Image (cartoon, helix red, strand yellow):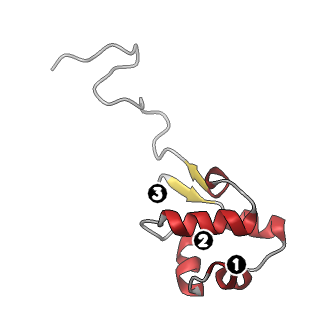
Amino acid sequence: MAIAVKLDELLHKQRMTLTELASQIDITLANLSILKTGKARAIRFSTLEAICRALSCQPGDILRFEPEHPERPSVRGRDESNQETVR
């Protein structure tokens, strides 16, 4: 997956357990664990906001984009010289 969740790192820095965070933001431990392990397919902004508030952090501190194929150009339909390809 291209989005990595860094929740474990933040919890460690804050010296907080997943159980403590779940209780503070009123989310089940199971759902928070799914997010922490990167198995979640989505996250509500309200949940993200609650996590940021509890950990005094920004959304970018929790989520990181990691390209699956960094050697490929980031824009489809363009070659390496940044010119549009003719099809």
Q: Nearer the viewer, mark 2 or mark 3?
A: 2
Q: CA distance from mark 2 to mark 1?
A: 11 Å
Sequence-earlier tag: 3 or 1: 3
Mark 2, residue position: 36
Q: Amino acid at mark 1?
A: Leu
Mark 3, residue position: 1
Packing grade of label 3 (10 A; few <14, some 14-19, many >=20) is few
Residue 37 visible within the image: no
Q: Residue at x 67, y 85 (%)?
A: 23
* In front of the other: 48 or 40: 48
> Could you say whether the residue bearing mark 2 is in a helix, strand or loop?
helix
Q: Residue at x 42, y 33 (%)?
A: 72
Residue 36 visible within the image: yes
Instruction: Provide residue 46's location: percent of width, then percent of height.
Output: 52, 67
* In front of the other: 73 or 15: 15
Q: Quadrant of residue 52?
A: bottom right
Mark 1, residue position: 21
Q: Amino acid at mark 2?
A: Lys
